[in-house]
């Protein structure tokens, strides 16, 4: 059986495999000498098709080439103005571009390994997709795209921090011979996003040679594309800001002249990115020797980048100045939010002597010296700090953690028994006009995938007979957190209400409505007849999968917050 895991990142995509026969876990190099494939698609001039990855990125600034970037986070976007601003068209939608990119990726994986099919793909999705109702569809859309790719037999979409936690917990087991149980703080700093997630890992036994663990993402925050629907204070904005300031200082812009962010500019940004990646050690050596506070000492050329026929100097001092202006404050703010949560919940994140709390900095921008230093200053790291011991075997693997984790999950070497990503149930008003939140399952509750759960009355614990043929249910309730005050009402579309109403049309038969999640956490509705005279349910459910929430709910009306 051939399986693989994919970290489908906003800026780079990585594929990994776990070879069960040799017990080798590795990221796959599909082109040139790097496992990091730019998540970029470009249309060839004159409608001659699409190119992908590094070849597409190299077309930046060339005449007639249209670039598509950051399409993952727009999969659930329906606003045509937002899509148009990002360069998408009716022909090249985020869904179509994603499908083309992943189809090309799957074909290259098969060619590399001499296989005909990928039996199972596990692909990571941002945890933030379950923080907002309007983005929930992203995970199901991604699952459906992968399911339509001929090279892929089965697919599972998992939370990115859960996948990374699986990788680090696996490392701990390999290095110590013991199962990891405790908390892992994941700081994922990429090109377009900062995602900070706190997970709980509980060893959950073994099934033959395979280990299982229960992984819960108990808190997350962030900034950038995943959270704010635009490229945020992360690697891309940092590099663009450095390049723009260097161009100004080189005198290539007038005092009040606005920079034109055209292909020539983005070609310069790409060149700067390569320099930052290739010269990581030189940056670390300079900042370690001179510190980062005395900018006069750092006024030495780091590199020169060509822009419109001129070489633009970038100094080490400029790298620090722009970091302080663009990155430092937002990174500090988000770390402070997470440490505040941990303090409130009694998690001792400053204890350097125990093995039950780990901190892992992942993502491409997480390799940058200034990011690492700020994180280490906040948590006051010391030599031989146990908060990072035994979860990292190779520092280079930190950037590949999500990909390697998904490979472990795809192979079955590690299994995750996950919990409900949100609460879902029926919204009703009681006799006094107060809202009743009758849940089928609750946020972070242990559940089984593909099993129907039915709402029970919050007052007496009895299963709710949901609707009569003449009085169909009109709204569901969804809650993304623990606090019932954050629950929202999601009204059903009229045509769907009528569909439910028509299912049961006998005056002696009514129905109950249940909910289930599959292994990609895509929601389905289960409708089962209930015989009032006999007082029992029918044997079979009618199942309606909600791969697109917009097919069921009036998304424009999802605004009401229930307050107790």
Image: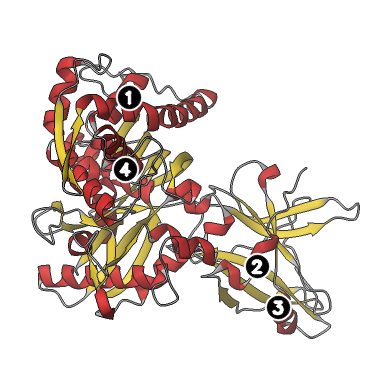
Q: Which dot, 4 or 2, sits closer to the camera?
A: 4
Give the CA separation, mark 4 to mark 2. Answer: 39 Å
**Residue at 63% across, 71% down:** 552
| Disc 2 residue crowd, few under 14, some 14–19, many 20+, Cα 10 Å | many
Local SS, label 4: helix
Look at mark 1 in the image and give the residue it sits on.
374
**Mark closest to the chain's N terminus, 1 or 3:** 1
Residue 464 placement: quadrant: bottom right
- The relative height of residue 83 versus residue 172 in the rendered view (above or below) is below
Query: Circle 4 is placed at which residue position?
Result: 240
Coordinates of residue 510 in the picture (x, y in percent): 77, 77
Q: Are marks 3 and 4 in contact (CB under 8 Å)?
A: no
Q: Earlier in the sequence, mark 2 or mark 1?
A: 1
Q: Earlier in the sequence, mark 3 or mark 2?
A: 3
Residue located beneath label 2 in the image: 553
Residue indicated by mark 3: 500
Vertical comparison of 448 with 271: above or below: below
Residue plotted at (78% across, 50% down):
459
Crowding around mark 1 (Cα neighbors within 10 Å: few <14, some 14 to 19, many 20+) is some
Disc 2 element: loop
Q: Assign a secondary structure to mark 1.
A: helix
* Colour scheme of the picture: secondary structure
């Amino acid at each position: 059986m051939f399986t693989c895991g994919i970290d489908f990142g906003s800026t780079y995509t990585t594929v990994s495999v776990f070879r069960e026969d040799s017990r080798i876990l590795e990221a796959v190099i599909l082109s040139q000498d790097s496992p990091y494939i730019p998540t970029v698609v470009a249309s060839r001039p004159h409608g001659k098709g699409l190119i992908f990855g590094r070849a597409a990125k190299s077309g930046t600034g060339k005449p007639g080439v249209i670039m598509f970037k950051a399409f993952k986070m727009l999969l659930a976007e329906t606003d045509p103005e937002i899509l148009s601003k990002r360069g998408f068209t009716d022909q090249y939608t985020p869904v179509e571009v994603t499908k083309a990119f992943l189809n090309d990726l799957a074909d290259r994986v098969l060619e590399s390994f001499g296989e005909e099919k990928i039996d199972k793909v596990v692909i990571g999705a941002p945890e933030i997709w379950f923080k907002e109702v309007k983005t929930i569809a992203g995970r199901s859309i991604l699952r459906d795209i992968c399911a339509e790719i001929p090279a892929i037999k089965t697919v599972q979409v998992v939370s990115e921090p859960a996948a990374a936690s699986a990788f680090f917990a696996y490392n701990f087991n390999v290095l110590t011979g013991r199962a990891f149980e405790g908390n892992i703080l994941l700081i994922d700093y990429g090109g377009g996003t900062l995602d900070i997630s706190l997970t709980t890992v509980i060893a959950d036994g073994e099934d033959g040679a395979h280990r299982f663990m229960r992984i819960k993402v108990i808190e997350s925050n962030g900034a950038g594309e995943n959270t704010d629907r635009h490229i945020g204070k992360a690697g891309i904005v940092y590099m663009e800001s450095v390049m723009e300031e260097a161009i100004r200082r080189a005198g290539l812009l007038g005092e009040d002249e606005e920079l034109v962010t055209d292909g020539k500019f983005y070609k310069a940004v790409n060149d700067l990115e390569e320099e930052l990646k290739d010269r990581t050690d030189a940056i670390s050596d300079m900042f370690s020797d001179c510190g980062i506070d005395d900018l006069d000492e750092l006024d030495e050329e780091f590199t020169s980048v060509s822009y419109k026929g001129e070489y633009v100097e970038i100094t080490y001092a400029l790298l620090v100045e722009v970091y302080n202006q663009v990155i430092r404050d937002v990174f500090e703010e988000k770390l402070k939010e997470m440490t505040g949560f941990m303090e409130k919940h009694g998690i001792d994140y400053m204890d350097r002597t125990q093995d039950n709390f780990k901190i892992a900095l992942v993502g491409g921008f997480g390799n940058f010296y200034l990011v690492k230093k700020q994180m280490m200053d906040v948590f006051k790291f010391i030599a031989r700090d146990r908060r990072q011991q035994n979860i990292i075997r190779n520092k280079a693997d930190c950037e590949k953690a999500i990909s390697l984790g998904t490979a472990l999950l795809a192979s079955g070497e590690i299994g995750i028994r996950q919990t409900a990503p949100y609460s879902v149930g029926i919204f009703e008003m009681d006799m006094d006009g107060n809202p009743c939140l009758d849940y089928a399952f609750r946020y972070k509750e242990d559940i089984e995938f593909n099993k129907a759960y039915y709402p029970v009355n919050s007052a007496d614990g009895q299963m709710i007979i949901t609707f009569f043929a003449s009085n169909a249910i009109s709204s569901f309730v969804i809650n993304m957190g623990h606090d019932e005050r954050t629950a929202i009402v999601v009204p059903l579309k009229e045509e769907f209400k009528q569909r439910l109403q028509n299912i049961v049309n006998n005056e002696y038969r009514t129905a109950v409505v249940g909910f289930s999640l599959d292994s990609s956490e895509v929601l389905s509705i289960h409708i089962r007849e209930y015989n009032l005279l006999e007082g029992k349910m029918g044997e079979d459910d009618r199942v309606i999968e909600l791969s697109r929430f917009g097919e069921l709910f009036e998304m424009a009306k999802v605004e009401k917050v229930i307050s107790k």
